[in-house]
Amino acid sequence: MDEKGFLMGVINKTKRVFTLNLKKQGKLLGASQDGSRSWITFLACICQDLTSLPPFLIYQGKAGQVQDSWLTEFDPEHQSAFFTTSETGWTNHELGKEWLIGVFDRFTKAKARNGRDYRLLITDGHSSHINMDFLDWCDQHRIIVAVFPPHSTHRLQPLDVSLFSPLSTAYTDQLVQWTAKTQGLINLSKREFWTLFWSAFEASFSPENIASGWRRTGLLPFDPEVVLSQIAKVEEEDPDTDSDSADSRALQKPTARELRRLVDN
């Protein structure tokens, strides 16, 4: 599981040609200035069977008050997603547990013989899902939580390695098309976001990209050398300088040999 943020209302820098009259009439304001800056967080999760769990989207707004106007294009018969809000648009303890129970447990329980088998949830150390309330609930429901080491998700997290980049590219493509269609005169709002996001999500969270994420992080099939060989290569190209200071040594990157020993143990 991992999260990705989307910032709306960023100034559009696309160059276009308009008549002088439109400029004098003030109709180009939306093309250069957009005061509707808002944050939306996407909680994502993929499974080893090459499927993904429904998106969990956190809109910036008054806590617990999702507006119907934001979801006019949402089609529950053909689309699956969950929507909530927070004051910042970021996740927190309450929303982390809401995702755990309403999305992760709900959509993975059947894959674990209705919860009789253990499930593994791999995530980073964010406090929204690494807190005692979250972990106690996991322990009570046979969910093992594995936490990536700090500053390692760019190599170990399948979502970071193979899915979020295609998602960003696909979303940008959708945004460019929408901007061209509206001539940049309409601010992107929460209402339009869902349509752009869903198209990008469908295009990027494919079985092929999910398989690539598991494979390139050495998690499925399990092969630590996939990651360790990358670290060894970086060390050969940019070796650490020697230091007599214990503090300096503590801050140095672990060697491939040290990481291999940790994996073996």
Image (cartoon, rainbow, N blue to C red):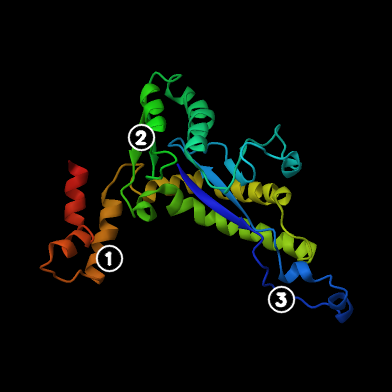
Q: Amino acid at mark 2?
A: Val
- Residue 100 x, y percent position in the rendering: 48, 32
**On the picture, is 251 further left or further right than 16?**
left
Residue at image point 69% right, 72% down: 14
Q: Is residue 236 left or right of residue 205?
A: left
- Element carrying mark 2: strand
Q: Residue at x 68, y 63 (%)?
A: 176
Q: Amino acid at mark 3?
A: Lys
Q: Quadrant of residue 78?
A: top right
Quadrant in which the N terminus is drawn: top left
Which label lies toward us, 1 or 2?
2
Residue annotated with mark 2:
145
C-alpha separation, residue under disc 3 versus residue under disc 1: 40 Å
In the depicted structure, whether residue 17 falls above or below residue 163? below
The first of marks 2 and 3 along the sequence is 3
Q: Residue at x 54, y 55 (%)?
A: 166
37 shown above or below 241: above
Query: Which is nearer the N-term, disc 1 or disc 2?
Result: 2
Q: Quadrant of residue 120?
A: top left
Q: Residue furthest bottom?
A: 20
**Image quadrant containing the C terminus:** top left
| Residue tagged 3 | 15
- In primary-sequence order, the first of circles 3 and 1 is 3
Q: Which residue is mark 1?
A: 234
Above or below residue 58? Residue 117 is: above
Is 138 drawn above or below residue 125 in the view shown? above
Circles 1 and 2: CB atoms closer than 8 Å: no
Q: Secondary structure beneath disc 1?
A: helix
